[in-house]
Amino acid sequence: MQSFSNIADLRTHLLPLRRGKIALVPTMGALHAGHLSLIQQARSAAEHVVVSIFVNPAQFAPHEDFDTYPRNIARDLELIEGLNLDNITIFTPDISEIYPAPATTKIQLGDIDTRWESPARPHFFSGVALVATKLFNIIQPDIALFGEKDFQQLQVISQLVHDFSVPIEIIGAPIVREPSGLAMSSRNAYLTDEERKIIAPKLYQGLQDAAEKIRAGELVESVLEKAKQYLSAAGFAPIDYFAYVDSTALMPLSNVSKGGARLLAAARLGKTRLIDNIAVT
């Protein structure tokens, strides 16, 4: 396992490796089992894997947790080493390496950037699109893996790659959950023990219950309203959204879909904002 913080050195290192496939796993560090699963899947799909660890300031608003976001690169490297995989490269750039000057270019993402996460975090996806584009250009991978927990982000990246004809295959990886069902997230560290063990798993339980009712033919509008009431009674506030959508453009659905559909939810529990989703088939 080799680590680089400089773009030029990383590119020199990768040049002879391009005879085989290169996979990218972009992360913001604070790694957990979900990230490690992504790395394992990437290594199964490609001869070489680049794991980037970079807390991207462009996707944080001034009032958000950029300064307090969990950071422990030494532990992250230990976890990756513990996978005992060969052909792994780590990219840990400083902010000045990725943004040597303030970025003035903006990426307009269209309708998918007008709903769900965007009203609560209107800066978020433009910042994600910017750093993803930079990483794609720096590393030039053949494939890139993103977790399905951030499902809207996965669709934004897929649209970005499609619209700009970027020669990268985007792979979405299933959500990895704690034994309680809580979707693994670096921000779960913000939860108290009671929140993490007792209350937070009810977000997933609410999604499962809503999916079962939709499959049974209950009115979608009623199902979504009852789900919000369930979460509110459990202690979530505010509930940003609980939605039933198509799985590509993420447009709201009012009836059971015969195609791909998804339930999306975002709600705050104490100091922590949680998001989750499940497929409804």
Image: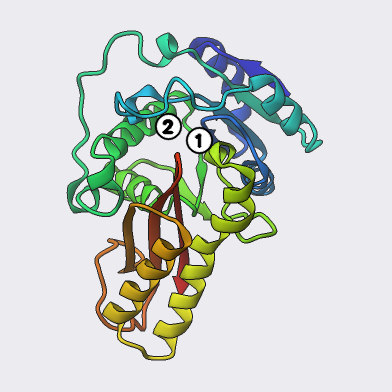
* Quadrant in the picture for the N terminus: top right
- Circles 2, 1 touching at the beta carbon (< 8 Å): yes
16, 271: nearer the viewer? 271
Q: Which residue is mark 2?
A: 136
Q: Residue 62 location, x and y as percent?
A: 30, 23
Residue drawn at x 43%, y 90% is 216
Q: Is residue 264 left or right of residue 163?
A: right
Label 1: how many residues lie within 10 Å, few (<14), some (14-19) or many (20+)?
many
Label for residue 141? 1
Q: Residue 84 location, x and y as percent?
A: 81, 36
Under circle 1, the secondary element is: loop
Instruction: Answer yes or no: is residue 81 visible.
Output: yes
**Identity, as a three-letter code, of the amino acid under mark 2:** Phe
Residue drawn at x 41%, y 9% is 96
Under circle 2, the secondary element is: helix
Q: Residue 134 location, x and y as percent?
A: 38, 26
Label for residue 278? none
Q: Is residue 116 left or right of residue 96?
A: left
